[in-house]
Image: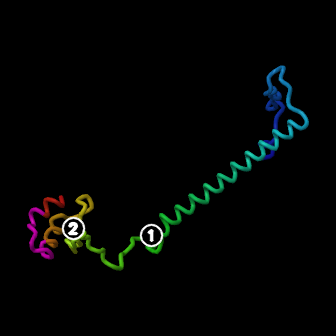
Amino acid sequence: MRSLFRRRESDVRAPLPSVVPAGVEQPAGELRQAIETGRNRLVLGGALFAIAFGVIALRLVDVAALRAADGDGAAASVQRAEPRAEIVDRNGILLAGNLATASLYANPRQVIDPDASARRLVQILPGLNEGEVAAKLK
């Protein structure tokens, strides 16, 4: 097992050549320290932005996915406590009002048995035609 982690003499490579082109001097002294300080600040700023982005992403997942399933979070539907007011013109003539209506919707791709569903809907809502409802559910 030890032989797996030992380096053989044939595995040792020659050192990589310098990245600095010939004839270009590497900065020394204060200039080198200023470059290192700038690089360190850039890395620190990038790390802070990455952490901030991660925190925001986790919060979005928490609000959108986890709390929406409970029904207690901000994504839950809002119920109005009072009805909306009617809209009238300056003479008091009604322009727009509210009508309480019933609504029914079914996605045909999610209906398992359209014929049985049509029969039950016609029993509940007698004004419907069973054949038309079954055709719309298929």
Percent from the top left, x then y, of residue 25? 86, 26
Q: Which residue is mark 1?
A: 69
Verify whether residue 123 appears in magenta: yes
Verify whether residue 74 appears in magenta: no
Q: Amino acid at mark 1?
A: Ala
Colouring scheme applied when the structure was drawn: rainbow
Tell me the crowding category of disc 2: few under 14, some 14 to 19, or many 20 or more residues within 10 angstroms, Cα based.
few
Residue farthest along the top direction in this orientation: 23
Question: Cα distance, mark 1 to mark 2?
Answer: 40 Å
Tell me the crowding category of disc 1: few under 14, some 14 to 19, or many 20 or more residues within 10 angstroms, Cα based.
few
Residue at figure coordinates x 76%, y 47% from the top left: 41
Element at label 1: helix
Residue at figure coordinates x 18%, y 61% from the top left: 137
Q: Nearer the viewer, residue 32 or 138?
A: 32
Percent from the top left, x then y, of residue 80? 35, 76
Residue at figure coordinates x 21%, y 67% from the top left: 95
Q: Nearer the viewer, residue 21 or 17?
A: 21
Specify the segment rendered in magenta: 122-132
Percent from the top left, x then y, of residue 116? 16, 69
Mark 1–mark 2 CB contact (< 8 Å): no
Q: Quadrant of the C terminus?
A: bottom left
Quarter residue 30 falls in? top right
Disc marking residue 1? none
Element at label 2: strand
First of labels 1, 2 by sequence position: 1
Q: Nearer the viewer, residue 85 or 89?
A: 89
Q: Which residue is mark 2?
A: 95
Q: Amino acid at mark 2?
A: Leu
Residue at figure coordinates x 18%, y 64% from the top left: 114
On screen, residue 37 above or below 98 = above
